[in-house]
Amino acid sequence: MSHVYLMPLGRVAPVILEIMSRAVVDAFGLGTRVGHGVPDISYAYDPTRNQYHVSKLLMEIIKDPPADAMRVVGIAEVDLFLPIFTFLFGEAQLGGKGAILSAHRLHNKFYGLKHDPQLFDERVRKEAIHEIGHTFGLIHCFDPVCVMRSSTYVEDVDYKSIEFCSSCQTRLNHSLPGKKGLFG
Ligand SMILES: [Zn+2]
Ligand SMILES: [Zn+2]
């Protein structure tokens, strides 16, 4: 139960999996594996919204995870939604096993701006750490630069740092494997 599985949802550029893998090692000290993912995500597509239903994707990746999967993290390049939200950068089970992240709105080109590989890399790492942080029991944080601060727009993602504030870091340390603690 020691690996974080990265699950491509549909077509995903390999560079995104590399960026996420680095983020998982840096922030959580955990190793990653790339799983089979969900090659055909058409079942989650909503033609009236031209978006994909995030919960339908999340349910698929957690229903039969690999035996050595501590966490399963889906990664999509398509746009995600929930009925109550216009769009979502991602979704996670609080204190659970699964999380989903979309890189769709983390690309500068989505906003009609020039591609910036370094900025994209940073955004993917922040949002991956944020969503996986939820699976370790971390809730949204009011520290303006903590990575667990919720982001509504990409500007919010850019404003916050890639680090946990000291309070979130302490909680996380108690939840990480091998550490005895409050959140188990
Ligand atoms: Zn969140
Ligand atoms: Zn925090």
Image (cartoon, rainbow, N blue to C red):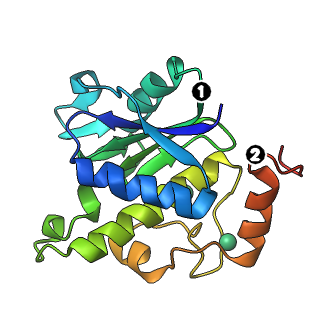
Q: Position of residue 102 (x, y in %)?
A: 33, 50
User: Hey, what amino acid is under mark 2?
Assistant: Pro
Residue occupied by mark 1: 68
167 to the left or right of 147 = right
The reply to whether residue 103 is visible in this rendering is no
Which residue is at the far top?
Answer: 64
Q: Is mark 2 within 8 Å of ligand 2?
A: no
Judging by the rendered image, the residue that carries numbered circle 2 is 177
**Ligand 1 sits in quadrant:** bottom right
In the picture, residue 54 is in which quadrant? top left
Q: Quick check: 176 above or below 119?
A: above
Q: CA distance from mark 2 to mark 1?
A: 14 Å
Q: Is mark 1 within 8 Å of ligand 1?
A: no
Q: Nearer the viewer, residue 172 or 59?
A: 172
Horizontal relation, residue 146 to residue 22: left or right: right
Name the residue nearer the viewer: 179 or 79.
179
Q: Element under label 1?
A: loop
> Residue 170, image x and y in percent?
79, 67
Q: Residue at x 59, y 27 (%)?
A: 68
79 shown above or below 41? below
Q: Is residue 25 above or below residue 101?
A: below
- Three-letter code, disc 1: Asp
Residue at 30% over, 53% down: 16
> Reading the chain from its start, which is encountered first: label 2 or label 1?
1
